[in-house]
Image (cartoon, rainbow, N blue to C red):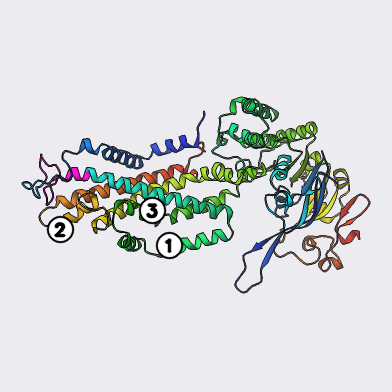
């Protein structure tokens, strides 16, 4: 059992019904199970529209699941009320993708960072300013920014403020929803170093959502690959990158640009992700799969555990 | 360089000369209304049988009416009515609009459906005739008018606030506040409301203009502020009765209404442009 366990999680969004038509559902997350171990980094990888961010919002209890359960320290977070919900809020924090939308434009840095401290009564009033300054120092910023507004900062600086806000409550776990993808490459490295430093130092477990495989390989302990709301392959990071099994994982890995190209022709994924409203029958990946064969368009492959991983593909059954 | 959003608004507004003119006009009207007792040369209700329907002159700069009352004094006192009606009515409308709009926008569900359909019903009734009908029941008085205009003009604000809430509640900083365990009340007030106030404030300013117009129209019809209390609308009524002999009775209060309404509109529109981040040049946001 990890610090956060997700069991057969589903989230369907209703799609506007046509007159006399039957109700259609967008299956954003369709039967996802995973377990984040205390102090470990669990990466969730996939293309846009694969349901990664929906998982993040579900784990934070910002939206409620259609079915399935999310356990935090073995307690179902949907059942939390009052005091125990506040304990959960204090324990699990989130960092968003877009640093320009994640800070209240009318609140100064001091207001933003002191809000969680006041709500959870972490710091007494006289020490508030010192605590906020020390949070800023943790993310490499100085006290002179306290009275500034978000629009005065660059994307990287804002993302640091967001990290500091998440750290204010000393969380056990942080969900990072593509925290680097809106930033310049040079800034990405800085932010990643901050996250990694904090993770090592404070033993915070991460649910790290990303589509950047190089970052995932560098930062995470365990990886799950998502496609159209389902996990298609799940393994320890080293294993997955050494020996990807699922055709989708192979395609994803081969799409990473290399510094020294080895001359081999890349297998580039053709086509787009199908709409999650109209999921293809059988294996959801079969229309784009270069290795599809007989059962792929008819039978949905099950997630099967092999010796070192879990994979859902008919090739391995 | 510390610049709060408010300072940016001010800087943008300062560059808009028309809006600034409107703002200056509004401020002067305020001063006139506040210092009415000092500024008006005569008692607005003092009847002078020797000077009935006098044209503008040095003793009566804007002329006198059919009872010999000084028009300038009556208009100065009438500005109090216009401002009071404008602000109280809009205050009521804005409060109702913010309350219903934020409830509908933040919580959604069946409450939202009921509120939005109620708004549709209210909007489907021609407001002016509704106000006339209600006045017929409760009787004309300045307080009734303020309340009724307020109760019939909140729908636009409610829709505006709901729309702002719908977009803002999905923004990451609001989600982050929820993830931090901030209470619904504090999220609504500190995170959503404060960020949706600029358009509400603009619509309130524009609303003052239309409230002043409605009050003038009601007073003109004799269903608003009752004589002898002066209001721009009921000065116009006596203007209508004497239009062939005393043009000054119609022209001056008409101009006052026109200029006031235009000032509010210019100022409100300037404010709207100044507070719309999409119109900010790069470097300002």
Quickly name the residue at label 1: B122
Quickly name the residue at label 3: B150
Label 1: few (<14), some or many (≥20) within 10 Å?
some
The answer to whether any part of residue A96 appears in the image is: no
Does residue B214 appear left or right of residue B281 in this picture? left
Q: Is residue A143 above or below residue A38?
A: above
Q: Main SS of the magenta segment?
A: loop
Give the spatial CA distance, label 2 vs label 1: 35 Å
Q: Are marks 3 and 2 on the same chain?
A: yes
| Along the viewing direction, whichever of A28 and A5 lies nearer the viewer | A5
Bounds of the magenta segment: B56-75
- Name which of mark 3 and mark 2 comes first in the sequence: 3
Residue sitting at the far bottom = A20
Residue sitting at the far front = B138
Q: Chain of mark 3?
A: B
Which x, y percent locates residue B211?
34, 52
Please tell me which residue is depicted at 12% across the width and 42% down the height of the picture: B60
- Name which of mark 2 and mark 1 comes first in the sequence: 1
Does residue B177 appear left or right of residue B116 in this picture? right
Residue sitting at the far left = B50
- Image quarter of the C terminus of chain A: bottom right
Q: Chain of mark 2?
A: B
Q: Chain of mark 1?
A: B
Label 3: few (<14), some or many (≥20) within 10 Å?
many
Which x, y percent locates residue B45?
17, 46
Provide the secondary structure element on which disc 2 rests: helix
Residue B130 belongs to the span the image colors magenta:
no
Provide the secondary structure element on which disc 1 rests: helix
Provide the secondary structure element on which disc 3 rests: helix
């Amino acid at each position: 059992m990890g610090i956060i366990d997700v069991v057969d999680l589903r989230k369907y969004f209703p799609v506007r019904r046509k007159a006399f038509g039957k109700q259609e559902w967008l299956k954003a997350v369709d039967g996802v199970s995973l377990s984040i171990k205390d102090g470990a980094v669990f990466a969730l990888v996939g293309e846009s529209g694969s349901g990664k961010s929906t998982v993040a919002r579900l784990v934070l209890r910002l939206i409620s699941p259609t079915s399935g359960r999310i356990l935090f320290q073995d307690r179902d977070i949907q059942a939390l009320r009052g005091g125990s919900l506040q304990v959960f809020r204090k324990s699990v924090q989130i960092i968003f993708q877009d640093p320009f939308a994640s800070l209240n434009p009318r609140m100064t840095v001091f207001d933003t960072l002191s809000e969680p401290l006041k709500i959870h009564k972490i710091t007494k009033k006289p020490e508030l300013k010192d605590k906020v300054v020390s949070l800023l120092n943790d993310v490499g910023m100085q006290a002179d920014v306290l009275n500034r507004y978000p629009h005065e900062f660059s994307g990287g600086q804002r993302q640091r403020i967001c990290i500091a806000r998440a750290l204010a409550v000393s969380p056990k776990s942080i969900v990072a929803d593509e925290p680097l993808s809106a930033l310049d490459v040079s800034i990405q490295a800085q932010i990643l170093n901050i996250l990694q430093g904090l993770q090592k130092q404070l033993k915070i477990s991460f649910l790290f959502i990303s589509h950047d495989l190089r970052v995932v390989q560098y930062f995470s302990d365990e990886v799950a690959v998502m496609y159209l709301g389902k996990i298609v392959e799940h393994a320890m990071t080293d294993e997955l990158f050494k020996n990807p099994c699922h055709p989708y994982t192979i395609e994803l890995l081969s799409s990473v640009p290399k510094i020294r190209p080895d001359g081999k022709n890349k297998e580039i994924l053709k086509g787009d992700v199908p709409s999650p409203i109209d999921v293809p029958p059988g294996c959801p990946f079969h229309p784009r799969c270069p290795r599809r064969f007989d059962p792929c368009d008819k039978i949905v492959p099950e997630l099967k555990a092999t010796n070192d991983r879990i994979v859902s593909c008919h090739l391995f059954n | 360089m510390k610049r709060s959003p408010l300072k940016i608004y001010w800087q943008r507004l300062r560059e808009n000369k028309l809006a600034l003119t409107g703002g200056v006009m509004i401020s002067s009207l305020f001063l006139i209304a506040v210092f009415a007792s000092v500024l008006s040369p005569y008692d607005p209700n003092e009847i002078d049988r020797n000077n009935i329907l006098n044209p503008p002159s040095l003793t009566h700069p804007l002329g006198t009416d059919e009872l010999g009352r000084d028009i300038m004094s009556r208009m100065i006192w009438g500005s109090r009515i216009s401002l009071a009606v404008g602000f109280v009515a809009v205050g009521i409308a804005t409060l109702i609009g913010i309350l219903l709009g934020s409830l509908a926008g933040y919580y959604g569900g069946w409450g939202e459906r009921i509120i939005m359909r109620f708004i549709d019903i209210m909007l489907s009734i021609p407001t002016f005739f509704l106000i006339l009908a209600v006045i017929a029941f409760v009787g004309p008085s300045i307080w009734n008018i303020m309340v009724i205009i307020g109760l019939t003009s909140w729908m636009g604000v409610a829709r505006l606030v709901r729309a702002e809430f719908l977009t803002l509640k999905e923004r990451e900083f609001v989600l982050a506040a929820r993830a931090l365990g901030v209470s619904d009340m504090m999220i609504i007030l500190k995170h959503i409301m404060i960020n949706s106030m600029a358009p509400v404030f603009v619509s309130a300013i524009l609303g003052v203009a239309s409230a002043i117009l409605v009050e003038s129209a009601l007073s003109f019809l004799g269903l608003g502020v009752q004589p002898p209390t002066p209001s721009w609308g009921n000065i116009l009524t006596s203007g209508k009765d004497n239009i062939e002999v005393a043009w000054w009775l119609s022209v001056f209060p008409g101009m006052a209404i026109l200029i006031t309404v235009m000032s509010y509109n210019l100022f409100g529109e300037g404010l709207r442009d100044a507070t719309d981040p999409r119109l900010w040049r790069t470097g300002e946001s």
